[in-house]
Amino acid sequence: MDGWSVERLHADHAQALRMAVEHYDSATDHQRIRVFENPTFGRVMTLDGVVQVTEADNFIYHEMLTHVPILAHGAVRRVLIVGGGDGGMAREALKHEAVEQVTMVEIDGAVVDFCRQYLPGISAGAFDDPRLDLVIADGADFMRQNRDEYDVIIVDSTDPVGPGEVLFTDSFYGHAKARLAEGGILVTQNGVPFLQGEELAGTMRAFRALFADPTCYLATVPTYSGGPMAFGWGTDGDARKVDIGTLRDRFEASGIVTDYYTPEVHLGAFALPPYIARHLG
Ligand code: SAM
């Protein structure tokens, strides 16, 4: 399909986005980066042909992977992001003034450089925030070697093919748990269960062995096609018991303006339909 970016992440289901203007298409040491303009979704970045981020719908994904754990926890000071090269996750995490440090471990420095140039609206200045510590490294290596503690760890990786594969392993999750401070929360990009159910089941198997509270929550992101996306949730704390009144107070105190996240959406996101809940084991 000339003039279209066709995503073939799944065996029997593809997604095509029209490339009205192609801005860039090149390979780094790790993956192929492409950016194009789509009239509906704005600028789109794909890595190895898979949609990573679009200007139009990234707010859903980035708001739900940051504000849910941060507001549920209530006293987050240190955040670790694994992946996140476009800077959108750092953008949302840094909106919390009480967050003192965000460490972001991205394997491909070219993705960061590239997104700063071609997709500046996604990071929206996050890369220049003095609280951001950007580390260019494999997240799995970092997690094995690092000795710091974090209140929230966000795995904002590509899918488990190519460089992202190591971020969906029991050993990675085990090392991540060891980096969590007391009451800390690990959340993960865990694919679209209707098409990637086994991915979620694998993460939940590992989380059941590691955490007192293993589950997932949902949000539908139009360009992660196939239905709701699952976000893995693992913690030994009781952050998921936060009540709506507390969440509303925390959200209001944060002063953060959102387009998807609300305290009501937060609590509702953990209500799982049976076809997804069965992956929790
Ligand atoms: N929102 C996207 C999704 O849900 O698929 C993820 C976007 S973000 C751009 C994914 C990032 O993960 C990329 O920048 C990629 O370079 C990075 N990444 C992949 N494997 C990694 C690894 N092993 N360690 C650190 N970063 C990794």
Image: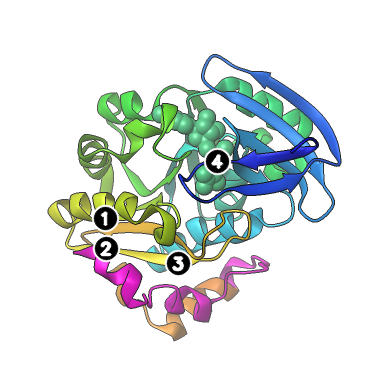
Q: Which mark is residue 106?
A: none
What's the amino acid at mark 1? Ala
Image coordinates of residue 275 in percent, x first then y, are 33, 71
Tag 4 or tag 1, which sits nearer the N-term?
4
Q: Are marks 1 and 4 in contact (CB under 8 Å)?
A: no
Q: Which residue is mark 2?
A: 279
Q: Which residue is mark 3?
A: 218
Residue 72 location, quadrant: bottom left
Q: CA distance from mark 4 to mark 2?
A: 24 Å
Q: Which residue is mark 4?
A: 8
Residue 241 location, quadrant: bottom left
Q: Is residue 124 left or right of residue 90?
A: right
Badge 2: how crowded within 10 Å, few (<14), some, or many (20+)?
some
Tag 3 or tag 2, which sits nearer the N-term?
3
Q: CA distance from mark 2 to mark 1?
A: 5 Å
Badge 1: how crowded within 10 Å, few (<14), some, or many (20+)?
some
Q: Is residue 180 left or right of residue 130?
A: left
Q: Which residue is mark 1?
A: 201
